[in-house]
């Protein structure tokens, strides 16, 4: 596996398969949990690209999300 980083994206060489991974980081295990970040990774035809978005916590707490 070969890795290359450009700006905030990481590219990893894969075999001829498509992969999609979604990762939620939360502050609780319930469905009403505060979500602190969402990560997405997509691989297709030998390239793997990932993104991450960090979410604001205060507004989620004010709207009833749990920790």
Image (cartoon, helix red, strand yellow):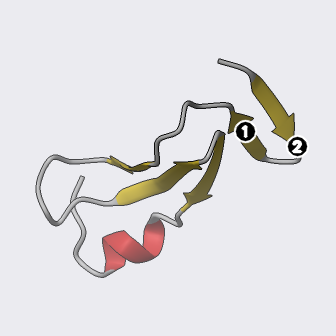
Rendering quarter of residue 46: top right
Q: Is residue 65 above or below residue 17?
A: below
Picture coordinates of residue 24 (x, y %)?
A: 36, 51
Q: Contact, CB < 8 Å: mark 1 with mark 2? A: yes
Q: CA distance from mark 1 to mark 2?
A: 8 Å
The residue lying furthest to the top in this view is 1
Q: Which residue is mark 2?
A: 6
Rendering quarter of residue 31: bottom left
For residue 15, side relative to residue 47 (left or right):
left
Q: Is residue 57 above or below residue 11?
A: below
Q: Secondary structure at mark 1?
A: strand
Rendering quarter of residue 5: top right
For residue 62, side relative to residue 39 (left or right):
left
Identified at 46% across, 48% down, the residue is 18
Q: Is residue 29 above or below residue 59?
A: above
For residue 56, side relative to residue 29 (left or right):
right
Q: Nearer the viewer, mark 1 or mark 2?
A: 1
Picture coordinates of residue 67 (x, y %)?
A: 24, 52
Identified at 88% across, 43% down, the residue is 6
Q: Secondary structure at mark 2?
A: strand
For residue 55, side relative to residue 12 (left or right):
left
The residue lying furthest to the right in this view is 7
Foreground residue, 59 or 1?
Answer: 1
Badge 1 or badge 2: first in the primary sequence:
2
Identified at 29% across, 81% down, the residue is 63
Picture coordinates of residue 28 (x, y %)?
A: 21, 48
Q: Which residue is mark 1?
A: 11
- Tell me if mark 2 has few (under 14), some (14-19) or many (20+) residues whose alpha carbon lies within 10 angstroms of its own: few
């Amino acid at each position: 596996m070969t890795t290359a980083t450009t700006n905030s994206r990481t590219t990893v060489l894969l075999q001829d398969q498509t992969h999609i991974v979604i990762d939620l980081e939360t502050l609780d295990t319930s469905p009403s949990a505060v979500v602190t970040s969402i990560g997405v990774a997509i691989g297709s035809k030998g390239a793997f690209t990932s993104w991450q978005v960090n979410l604001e916590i205060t507004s989620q707490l004010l709207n009833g999300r749990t920790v």
